[in-house]
Image (spheres, rainbow, N blue to C red):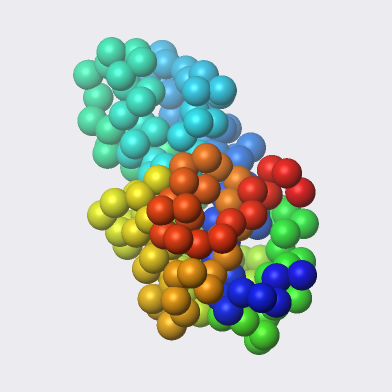
Amino acid sequence: MYDRYEGLIFDMDGTILDTEPTHRKAWDHVLSRYGMHYDAESLAALNGSPTWRVAETIIATHQADLDAHQLAAEKTAAVKEMLFDSVQPLPLLEVVKAYHGRRPMAVGTGSEHAMAEALLRHLGVLACFQAIVGADDVTEHKPAPETFLRCATLMGVAPERCVVFEDADFGIEAARRANMAYVDVRTL
């Protein structure tokens, strides 16, 4: 089905791994310490963003005097405690398995590199990917194209010969800006 592309790039959270419920639970846990909460709809618009950017939005909404990077670190620590027990593969992981060894593949995620690598290893699919580009590997995050362009470079495939699988508007915009084809997995 995707044979016409030379490289396949996958977002991770919400695309190949069902991590969203755990991320929401971690935010609830951390924010309750500060008497704060988040609006799920508003945060859904930030899917694909680095955790510190989400933290900035939550802090701004509450007009709280907190450091976004510290709040993000607390949330990441909470996710790490919960995630390995709860993460589940999503159906698109079958595409990864089908193209393993047939096409170079990469993960371009708003999660930290080490977290992405650990989750993919935990589910036994790390070896399927030639590259992982996490939020801490780039300076300009989605919707900027840097994440996906770096994936293409690391795979050795021209951007216009890649397809990106995404579940978030920021990621789809990043794929467009990178001159890559994309699949909005929300429509599958």
Q: Residue 147 placed where, x, y %?
A: 39, 59
- The residue at 52%/48% (across/down) is 172
Lateral position of residue 141 relative to residue 20, left or right: left
Front residue of this view, candidates 53 and 85 = 53
Is residue 126 visible in this depiction of the protein? no
Name the quadrant containing residue 94: bottom right
Lateral position of residue 84 relative to residue 91, left or right: left
Front residue of this view, candidates 46 and 31 = 46
Q: Residue 79 placed where, x, y %?
A: 50, 44
Name the quadrant containing residue 91: bottom right
- The residue at 23%/30% (across/down) is 67
Lateral position of residue 38 relative to residue 71, left or right: right
Q: Residue 159 placed where, x, y %?
A: 45, 70
- The residue at 46%/46% (across/down) is 173
Front residue of this view, candidates 56 and 81 = 56
Residue 11 vs 44, above or below: the answer is: below
Name the quadrant containing residue 168: top right
Residue lying at the far bottom in this picture: please name it.
101
Residue 104 vs 27, above or below: the answer is: below
